[in-house]
Amino acid sequence: MWRPSLTPLKIFVKIKTPLQCSNKGKIIKTVLKKLIIKLLKLNINKKNILSIRRHNLPLVKEVYISDNKNKIYLLKTKWSYVLNLDTVKTLIDYNIYLDLNLFITRYQLRIPMDIVQKLSMQSYYKQCMQLPLQKNLIVFESFFGKNYSGQPKYLYEYLLEHNPSCTFVWVYQKDPQNIPGNPIIVKRGSREYFHYLATAQYWVNNIIFPIHKKRSETIYVQTWHGTPLKRLGYDIEVDGPEVNVRENFYKESRNWDYLLTQNAYTSEILQRAFKFDKEIIEEGYPHSDFLINATQKRAEQIKKSLELPLDKKIILYAPTWRDNDTNGNWSFNFTLKINLKKWQEQLGEEYIILIRMHHLITNIKDLDEVEGFAYNLSTYDDIQELSLISDILITDYSSVFFDFGVTKKPILFYTYDFEEYSEKLRGFYLDMKSDLPGPIIQEDAALLDAIINIKSIEVDYAEAYNTFIKRFCYLDNGHSTERVAKKVFKELHV
């Protein structure tokens, strides 16, 4: 029987037992978890058959799959418990349950089926790699399929104009009506997703794919998503979620054929932080072309589409996430440390504020109390479009200010947790007190005052802003997309 080679997985096991509250129960649960993680062998063969080795689990009396309403019992063979996964329509709705007896006590072990789904898709992906390569097929993904944005978006639109005969696939979780060109749309993690990844000539992504093995003929273009201020990868010196996944990123970067950067500063950092030793394309970022080339008419179209007032100035607040405020599974909380009610009283006649959270932040709610002044646009796909229509940027440690710099509009840095972030969370590559194109502000009242007096701040930071542009944005001249495309997609004759 053919079996895929599987990498070890950390399996979450929930144990239900009458002894949960006793010390003995806690000890038994800990031992059982370790045993299950060590001994459980999940395999998916090419016929999509799940097997769990029986002889590794001598205490198991029964194995079944349930969605808490319906049970599907696994067939017990001489060596394994087996199940044809084609009979389970939606894996995510089910859990695997293992019933066992130990010390005359019944234990129930639950394993989420999404682990099985990942194994199943890995097997399917390996089967699809045996299919012929599809020439001129390009797969695009931005921010885990959440957005149509970033360098992948602008490279796609360039190729759509200059080589429309290509087959374009977009990984996208939302309604695709705003994506031009009628590309093939697939959901991240679906069978179609792995099929196209296995057969595509090109991959284009700005973060990471869920697999670390591509066929040698496939060209992987890693566009990344910004010039770094905060430390990345192997440059991080404190514990946190980024440190926990950097080995995963190291494996991912072995697949990259090209890595795009905005400037020499970024090239040096990304090469070291990800231990990347292939070709870096240092030609500026494609998404900056939009900010340089977009017209006033385009800005008005965006405002109208968002139903924003055309007679008011716009503040864009775009902070990053905090490594230490997690919900688990790479989603994060954020506490809004702005008195929006007071801001509305002081600024409402002249300004509105757009709040655009990082894609990993999930807890920002509606802003009903300041309706008509503050707009939560955290789910809006392309922050470049919000930057275009904005008159002031407020951020903290996000790389968005490097991109915003090409607009030459004022930037304020609201870093109320500066000491904690720099010393305990991530640390910086730049000296934030001397290298930034705007002031560091740590209190809400001072931030409000800076907006009221924004003209004087522009004058005070004019020289620092010019120095910043010369150092970081010198390649952003409105033609980065063309230069990148001609180097990366040279086989397509763009």
Image: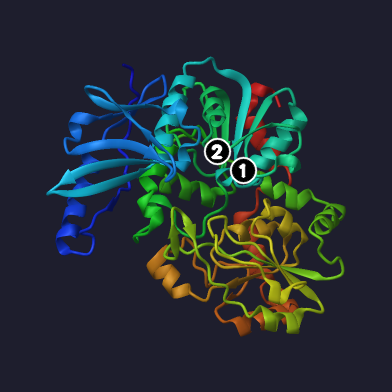
Q: How is the image coloured?
A: rainbow
**Residue 367 visible in image:** yes
Quarter of the image containing the C terminus? Answer: top right
Q: Which residue is mark 1?
A: 173
- Amino acid type, label 1: Gln
Where disc 1 sits, the SS reads loop
Q: Residue at x 42, y 30 (%)?
A: 120
Q: Residue furthest left?
A: 103
Q: Percent from the top left, x then y, of residue 21?
A: 22, 64
Q: Is residue 466 left or right of residue 281?
A: right
Residue 90: mark in rendering: none
The residue indicated by pointer 2 is 188
x and y percentages locating residue 361 in the rendered image: 54, 60
Q: Quadrant of residue 248?
A: top left
Indicate the quadrant where residue 139 lies.
top right
Camera-side residue: 404 or 86? 86
In the image, residue 449 above or below residue 336 = below
- Where residue 328 appears, x then y in whole percent? 42, 57
Crowding around mark 1 (Cα neighbors within 10 Å: few <14, some 14 to 19, many 20+) is: some
Residue 323 left/right relative to 292: left
Q: Residue at x 47, y 47 (%)?
A: 270
Q: Is residue 205 above or below residue 441?
A: above
Query: Mark 1 and mark 2 in contact (Cβ < 8 Å)?
Result: yes
| 494 versus 251 height, above or below | above
Q: Is residue 285 visible?
A: no
The amino acid type of the residue labelled 2 equals Arg
Q: Secondary structure at mark 2?
A: loop
Does 71 sit above or below residue 386? above
Real-space CA distance between mark 2 and mark 1, rounded to the nearest whole angstrom = 7 Å
Q: Earlier in the sequence, mark 2 or mark 1?
A: 1
